[in-house]
Every structure is written in C-alpha cells, then in structure tokens.
Amino acid sequence: MSEVNNLFQLVKPAQNLLLVLGDLTFTRDIDALSALLAYLKSENKSFELLTFSEFSHEIDDKLKSRNIVIKNEIKPTEYTVTIDYGSSGVEKVVYDTDKEAGKLVFKILPSKSGFSFDKIEFTEGGGKFDATILIGITNPKTLQPFYDENEYLFKENPFFSIATYEDIFSLFMDSEIEWQPQALDTLLQNYLNGVNLIEGQPDSQAIKNVMTLVDRGGSISDALKAKYYSHSPEYIDLVRQIFANVRISGYVIYSVLEKENLIGLDLDEISGYGRIPFNLASSYKLAFLFYELQDGIRVIVESNDPKSYSASTIAGVFSGSGDAGHSVCDLNDVKLEELNKRFWPILKDLYSIEVDVVADSKNVDNSARVLTKARRNSKNKGLKDSK
C-alpha cells in the first residue's frame, strides 16, 4: 500500500482527490469536514466525496444546507485507445467478445499502406484520481468490493487515513501551512461551533486552539457573530416563549417548552445561542432549559458555580456532553409530566438540591414562584403567582 503519514504532503501535488467517508453522526463531524473542504477549495483542488454509509435525515439536511454533495458511487475509469491512422490509414475497426475466455478482441483492418502498433496510444480517464483521503476509515480493505475494483487508489496512488472527523481539526492545529483568509475564517467558525466560549467553561486546549487560529489571521468577531448572532427571525419568538415559561425554585431557575413551540426550528439552532437567555443572575446556581421532542426531552444544563455544581456531571447521568459550565443531554422516552420522578431527583442525589415543583396541567413542573405574570388559558388555568 502507498499510505502516507502527512496529509498536506499528499494534497500539495494532487489535482483530483477522492474523499471516502465513514459514518457522519454529529453536526460536529460536518463542521470538521466542511473545514477540510474549504482548505481544498482554497488550494484549487478538485475532489469528490464518496460514502457507503447511510446517514440520518437530520445529517442529510445539514449536508444539503452547506451544499456538500456526497455520492454513493464514482464514475468508472475510462480506458481510451487512440489510433494515429494519418500515415498508415485504417479501413475499419471491429470488435468481438470471447465470453469463454473473458476477452474483448479488437480487429484493425489497415489500408494498403500497412499498419504500425507504434501509432496506438493507451490512456486512462473518467474517474481517475491521483490521491485518496479516508475519513472515519482506518483500513481501506474494509471497503471491499470497492477496494478490489479500484486497487490503484490504494496500491498505486498515495492515500491518507484520518481516524475521526475531530482529528481533522487536530491536523490543522498542528500544521504550519499557509491558509487563504476565507478558508481560515471557515476553519475558525467551524471549530468555534464546538467550543462553549461564552456559555460554558471550555478547557485550556480549546481556548489555545481558538487563539492559535486568531493569531494566524482568523476573524474572531466574524466567528462569534456566525455562532451566536445569526439566528432566524423565528428564534425571537422562541426566546419570548422561553422567558414566558421561566420558573424558579431556590438555587434553580428553569423553563419548559412544549414541542408545539418548536415547529420549524432546527435543534442545533435551539441549542446554539450561547447562554440560556434567562440565566443572567449568579444567585441561581443551576439553570435548565427543557425542550419537548417527539420521543423525549432535550435538556440544556448551565452552572454558575461549576466547581460546586457541574453541568457535565448532571448531563452525564443521561450520556450527555459538554463541560462543567454548559452541557446538553437527551432524556429519551421521557415525558414532561415525568420530570418530577425521572430528572429532578438527580439533583438531590448529586448535590442535595430539592426542586420545589407543583403539578399543573401539562406543564407539571411549574415551581412555586413564577417570573412572568400568569395568564388564564387552557394550559395554565387557575395558575397564580406564589409569594
């Protein structure tokens, strides 16, 4: 095999690259892939993306929104036979198929002046690539039968394997390559999408990576605007609903949104606005935002005292992710009316915090004190502010 150990040495001389992708599972994977594609475009490289995996509808939609086209097959290589008959002349060219021997036979009938094999040229075209990048695939032999049908990609041409999509960012951070300004801004924006710069407590390495990209010329202001201040107009209505449903109980402040409030909004947009809008007072140690989904609840957890109350520890109980200041988890197959039994007890077990809630219609987790004035309607009929 002709595997190389440096991505950028592979890319530099190549003109037409094939990127073979493994499973795309998270938006973060698309962020990393998008950064790599921005780099290849800035270097004027041609490329195609190929996968044999099936992606979720959510991932497919996100790929389309970023104009990333991934194919399930590549154009087969074309083999062209060119005959220079100017000096010798050719009366006719016919072919026959020898099925038993598995051969294709060409017959050239020359003119009276004769024929020379020196006048025949063989070339390859079509799906010919001169370098291959594997992402999420460490052993190309796992791609059989594609591997067997396109051996030149791995035996004749150089190829480079990237174990995970996140490793793309690491490769860029560790390199000293020159970036075109637009591609560098794309890299910084995509990397920042996975860093809780404002809403959480990112680790020192993440901060160092951001500053490295800024030192190289990336625009931090554009990256911050792209992440935190580029929402759709519908998002304003969402924030209004969030504030309208705010509840507090001791050191805990939270809001619950039913799925009817989320129609037309992307979950990444819901989760990616920075700090929870109402988490503005440090006197509340923990803030929660609950979104009702079709098959469960998404929870955003924020801690204003990460050393004492860790958001990642709370979310980790439900296999969530994030940092001590800001984390996200999904309560699969949990309904809003079950929060009292299936979520709030976690706070008591971890930090001896009891959330004082009362059952009331569908929003069963209304606390004893509400920040907004209650309105009488079908969902909060009879609800009164408590002192």
Image (cartoon, helix red, strand yellow):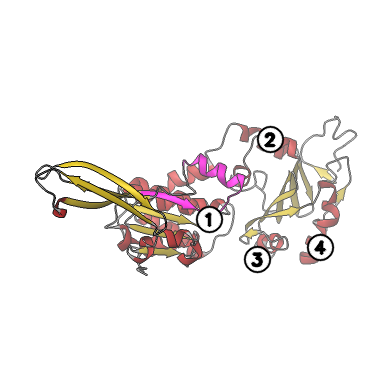
Magenta region includes residue 54: yes
Q: Residue at x 75, y 47 (%)?
A: 295
Q: What residue type is labelled 1?
A: Val
Rate crowding at label 1 as few (under 14), some (14 to 19) or many (20 or more) other CA atoms within 10 Å.
some
Q: In this view, does 68 lie above or below 154?
A: above
The residue at which mark 2 appears reads as 263
Q: Distance between the Cα atoms at labels 1 and 2?
A: 27 Å
Residue 190 in the image: state x and y as whole percent: 47, 50
Q: Describe the element under mark 2 as helix, strand or loop.
A: loop
Q: In this view, does 379 lie above or below 332?
A: above
Q: What stretch is highlighted in magenta?
A: 47-67
Residue 219 seen in the figure: no
Q: Is residue 63 above or below residue 154?
A: above
Q: Describe the element under mark 3 as helix, strand or loop.
A: loop
Q: Which of marks 4 and 3 is in front?
A: 4
Q: Which amino acid does label 3 sit on?
A: Lys
Q: Earlier in the sequence, mark 1 or mark 3?
A: 1
Q: Distance between the Cα atoms at labels 4 and 3?
A: 17 Å
Q: Residue 195 carries which label?
A: 1
The residue at which mark 3 appears reads as 307
Q: Which amino acid does label 4 sit on?
A: Lys
Q: Describe the element under mark 4 as helix, strand or loop.
A: helix
Q: Distance between the Cα atoms at labels 1 and 4?
A: 29 Å
Q: Nearer the viewer, residue 338 or 375?
A: 338
Q: Nearer the viewer, mark 1 or mark 3?
A: 1
Q: Nearer the viewer, residue 322 or 382?
A: 322
Q: Nearer the viewer, mark 2 or mark 4?
A: 2
Q: Are marks 4 and 3 in contact (CB under 8 Å)?
A: no
